[in-house]
């Protein structure tokens, strides 16, 4: 459930034009899905793909990858407190 919430927060950050935060939250969501061994499917997969595409356009692929890795390695409680 938290993985879905992180993805939703990523989408919200993107709408608020907080692209770097959106990338970190997306990275945390992706990592949590991986840790749980849960495949991202259906509407959630499409949402994450759309977010990623928009982040690539806004930040570039390298910066997006860097921030997603940062989000994946940051404890969720720290990420949400920021």
Image (spheres, grey):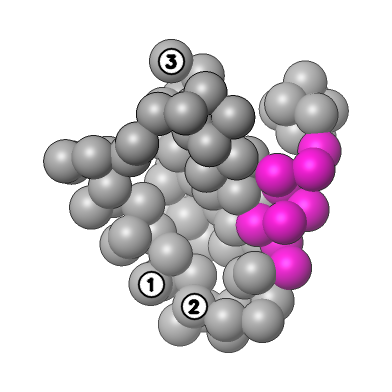
Residue 78 circle label: none
Residue 1 circle label: 3
Find residue 66 and report its image quarter.
bottom right
Disc with the residue nearer the chain's start (3 vs 2): 3
Q: Residue at x 65, y 57 (%)?
A: 68
Label 2, on which residue? 56
Instruction: For marks 1 and 2, give the CA distance.
Output: 5 Å
- Residue 62 located left or right of residue 9: right
Residue 48 visible within the image: yes
On the image, the x and y values in percent for residue 34 come to 53, 37
Q: Which segment is the magenta one?
A: 66-74
Q: Residue at x 57, y 81 (%)?
A: 61
Label 1, on which residue? 53
In the image, residue 16 lies in the stretch drawn in magenta = no
| SS class, disc 3 | loop
Q: Are marks 1 and 2 in contact (CB under 8 Å)?
A: yes
Disc with the residue nearer the chain's start (3 vs 1): 3
| SS class, disc 1 | helix
Q: Is residue 13 above or below residue 23?
A: above
On the image, the x and y values in percent for residue 53 come to 38, 72
For the N terminus, which image quadrant? top left
In the image, residue 67 lies in the stretch drawn in magenta = yes
Q: Do the residues labelled 3 and 1 touch (CB within 8 Å)?
A: no
Q: Which residue lies furthest to the left in this view?
A: 42
Instruction: For marks 3 and 2, give the CA distance.
Output: 26 Å
How would you rate the neighbour count of disc 3 (Cα within 10 Å): few for under 14, some for 14-19, many for 20 or more?
few
Instruction: For marks 3 and 1, give the CA distance.
Output: 23 Å
| SS class, disc 2 | helix
């Amino acid at each position: 459930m938290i993985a879905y919430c992180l993805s939703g927060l990523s989408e919200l950050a993107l709408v608020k034009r907080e692209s770097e935060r959106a990338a970190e939250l997306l990275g945390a969501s992706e990592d949590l899905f991986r840790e749980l061994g849960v495949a991202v499917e259906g509407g959630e997969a499409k949402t994450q793909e759309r977010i990623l595409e928009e982040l690539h356009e806004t930040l570039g692929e390298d910066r997006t990858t860097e921030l997603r890795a940062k989000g994946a390695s940051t404890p969720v409680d720290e990420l949400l407190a920021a």
